[in-house]
Image (spheres, grey):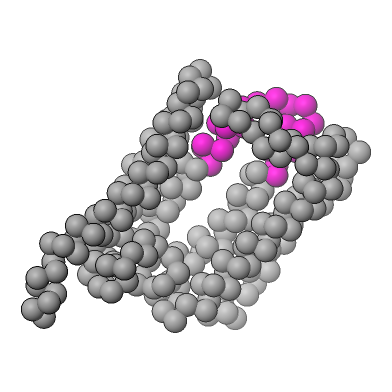
Amino acid sequence: MIKKYLPTVILTSLLTLLPILVGLILWKKLPDPMPSHFNAAGEPDGYLSRAAMVFGLPAGMLAAHLICVATTLMDPKKKNIDGKPFTLVLWIVPIVTLVVCGSVYVFALGYKFNMSVVAMLMCGVLFVLLGNYLPKCGHNYTIGIRTAWALNDEDNWRATHRFAGKVYVCLGLAIIVIALLSAKFPYLFWAMLVVTVLTAIIPVAYSYVYYLKHRGSSDQA
């Protein structure tokens, strides 16, 4: 599995570092310090040095990327992750890095826009993608809704991930709608946070309810 995906790991790692090259090209045009954090209204409320943003952010994301890949490859049941779910693991951090760094560079160059809208759109798309990939994710210890009830029962795992897939897609689409409306109604940012929390709570609750419902039949078996 390592040899199979090694070229993709190298490619995605280089893409994660690509903002460093772009930052060096734009170095003299970028302000120092640069905005590093934005409030609910999409306005900068935190700053870091230009060097920290250009070099530190992509380097930190690369570390996160490699940790995610290595952790997945060390999973005892990694064969159940092979395919589309692992492809998502390989590409999620590089894409997020390109979007985040690219948005910060553009904003820092003076092209003002609402960064919270960008962040919400990215979250919404991410949940839609996760919703499509989760049902395809086999029983494992690294990726998915890793409740004790799902990890101990493959039927619970399959049912939970089929359900979670639908939940993630629906809530992801809701976040995208909220993002598009939030430009006129900034308070909707908090609605996005509520929806995000629900994506974490609802599948876990479903897994537990499934466990309670099927506990008797499992014990008899």
* Residue 107 on the magenta span: yes
Image location of residue 103, percent across then percent down? 68, 38
Question: Taking 169 as reference, is 17 left or right?
Answer: right
* Residue 207 on the magenta span: no
Task: Locate residue 151: give its quadrant.
Answer: bottom left
Task: Locate residue 27: give its quadrant.
Answer: top right
Image location of residue 28, percent across then percent down? 91, 38
Question: Taking 147 as reference, is 30 left or right?
Answer: right
Image location of residue 41, percent across then percent down? 58, 25
Image location of residue 67, percent across then percent down? 60, 68
For residue 14, above or below residue 130: below
Q: How many marks?
A: 0
- Residue beneath the point at 16% across and 62% down: 212
- Residue beneath the point at 35% across and 43% down: 198
Tell me which segment is drawn in magenta: 101-122
- Residue beneath the point at 68% across and 61% down: 62
Q: Magenta region's main secondary structure?
A: helix
Residue 30 seen in the current view? no
For residue 215, above or below residue 3: above
For residue 180, above or below residue 139: above
- Residue beneath the point at 75% across and 50% down: 19
- As drawn, which residue projects farthest toward the right? 28
Quadrant in which the C terminus is drawn: bottom left
Q: In this view of the protein, which residue sits in the foreground, 66 or 205? A: 205
Residue 211 seen in the current view? yes
Question: Taking 35 as reference, is 113 left or right?
Answer: left
Question: Taking 176 as reference, is 40 left or right?
Answer: right
- As drawn, which residue projects farthest toward the top? 184
